[in-house]
Image: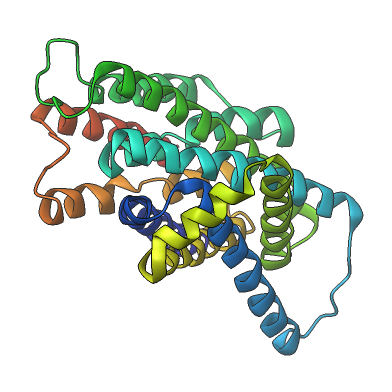
Amino acid sequence: MGVTFALLSMVCFASNILISRHAMARMPVDSGFFIVLGTNIVAGLVLFGAELMVRTTPFVFQWKESGLFIVGGTIGAFLGRRLLFDTVRLLGPARTSVFHSCAPVPTLVFAWVIVGETLGWYELALMAVVLAGLWITHPPQRDDTISRADRATLRRGMVFGLLTITGFGASNALRGLAMRSWNEAIFGALLGGTAAFLMQVLITRDWGRIAEGFRKGGRAGVLLYFASGLATMGGAILIITAMNYMEIALATLITHTTPLVVFPVSLVLYRNREGLTPRTVAGVLLVLLGIALLALR
């Protein structure tokens, strides 16, 4: 069951990476992110209401676990997910999916520190393998296959990508810790999504620009960000549920194998417009090798 939920979560997050590319072409992220987070809340409320109707045990609110879900959701849904959009914009969906697949690395560290899950030399060695694959994926200075994106943009995308997976890692550990004593995946995801939405409201200053983004995006932009919201909420609920059946690090590991979906789609549908080379593919294979060996531990 844990593997099944984690794989379904991976499909949701991979879909979001692909949807994001088209959504940002129609509406700025600053505006569209409100649609994503709003959709997270609405979808969470609907699913939680449906769960209350069919569940056989009463719902009991717990403050400590709720706080963990709120903090984890704020870090993951607000910081991590927001930076993920910026990473897609700067690096494209294929390279972004490589960063996304590396989230188990910081998750292992945070799960070890926060939850107490064991981190041994085997895991440390494979973390190095994954990071090496990530470095190989990033083209060298002499590589002219990325003429459409300058080096400064790529470096900025790398920074955003590293911050994204760090946020996801901390978020996964906190939510996994909450699931240890309170099996409320849907309500926990709803709390996190609501906290992220409130945080986005608090930091927004130029509301006129947000409204202008809604007008320019039109119906197509709204629908794409709405689909992104459904995908991210589904992915969040499924990965939290998977943590109830398996270790946090392993659940995250399977969930973040998004290149298995994103790379074939990017090559076929986008006709390799990102300039993916054999070097890029080799880096991705090394990343996936590290993740696969990590799963076998």
Query: Height in image: 158 above or below 250?
Result: above
Q: In the depicted view, which residue is nearer to us: 135 or 41? A: 41
> In the figure, residue 93 lies in which quadrant?
top left
Q: How many marks?
A: 0
Residue 235: where, in percent of width, then height?
Answer: 50, 59
Q: In the depicted view, which residue is nearer to us: 295 or 278? A: 278
Residue 19: where, in percent of width, then height?
Answer: 34, 58
Residue 251: where, in percent of width, then height?
Answer: 52, 49
As drawn, the residue found furthest toward the top would be: 142
Is 99 on the left-hand or right-hand side of 263? right
> In the figure, residue 223 lies in which quadrant?
bottom left
Q: Is residue 26 visible?
A: yes
Query: Height in image: 44 above or below 270?
Result: below
- Residue shown at 47% from the left, 47% from the top: 29
As drawn, the residue found furthest toward the bottom would be: 53
Q: In the depicted view, which residue is nearer to us: 180 or 185? A: 185
Q: Quadrant of the C terminus?
A: top left
Is 282 on the left-hand or right-hand side of 92? left
Q: Is residue 293 visible?
A: no
- Residue shown at 16% from the left, 29% from the top: 148
Query: Height in image: 201 above or below 45?
Result: above
Colour mapping: rainbow
Is 201 on the left-hand or right-hand side of 162? right
- Residue shown at 66% from the left, 40% from the top: 75
- Residue shown at 29% from the left, 24% from the top: 133
